[in-house]
Amino acid sequence: MEILKVENLCKIYGTGETRVEALRQVSFSMEKGEFGAVVGESGSGKSTLINCIGGLDEANAGKVLIGGRDVFAMGEDERTVFRRQNIGFIFQSFHLIPELNVEQNIIFPLLLDYKKPDQKRVDEILEVLGLVNRRGFLPGQLSGGQQQRVAIGRALITRPALVLADEPTGNLDSRNSQEVMDLLHKASRHYQQTVLMITHNMNLTSSADRVFRVTDGRLCELGGVSE
């Protein structure tokens, strides 16, 4: 089942001598449950790609279809709600609310839509991410790796069709980076969610089903690296 379809995506910044083609005719698709990794040098366009797919940035041309719905055909308010309900975001910075504990941070996206959390699902996510014994802790009482686990849980709680992860291990050491990668891959398999992750570290693509490279705004597929 196709979850994500990107068609001829173009993004241009500036005009004249300052004109930069950040994305050039990017097209690809991903199926339900696939784990994809995007690699590329700094400034290659990979973060722009994630931002356009997630509707955080407008493209100049092309389409992004998530679950068959065109992200750019929506009005701003509709897109905000769609994004919250259908896309999970994980960033390099954890963006946790310091006054809320682990469990409260995880369920926060549900509360924004006035939804009652399913306690069984919350408990399951805490178990999958190894946070059961930290559920009442505040972010300031956690390590960086534990805070990123909370951010992953928050991205998964709404059962999004697509999870976008932009350098999710950028602030972590190598041990915690691999641990977070393993947990993200485990969670994606467990919940059959499509994940597209940006990383500058090729060593962290070993668990991906497919690996893409962005160079000067153009995307090519390097192939899968996991069995």
Image (tube, rainbow, N blue to C red):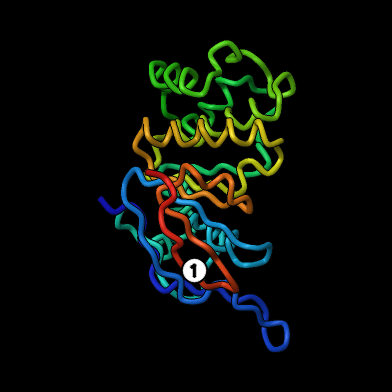
Seen as rendered, the residue at the extreme left is 1
Q: What residue is drawn where x is 64% and y is 75%?
A: 13
Up-down: is 29 above or below 197? below
Q: Nearer the viewer, residue 121 or 174?
A: 174
* Residue 218, x across and y down, in percent: 52, 73
Task: Evaluate whether residue 26 shows in this view.
Answer: yes
Q: Position of residue 3 (x, y in %)?
A: 33, 52
Mark 1, other Cα within 10 Å: few <14 / some 14–19 / many ≥20: many
Residue beneath label 1, please?
219
- In the rendered view, would you say 167 is above or below 191? below
Residue drawn at x 65%, y 37% is 94
123 left or right of 166 in image:
left
In this rendering, the count of numbered labels is 1
Of the residues shown, which amino acid type is indicated by label 1? Leu
Quadrant in which residue 30 is drawn: bottom left
Which corner quadrant holds the C terminus? top left
The one of 185 and 92 positioned closer to us in this rendering = 185
Q: Going 51% across and 33% down the picture, which residue do you hit?
A: 182
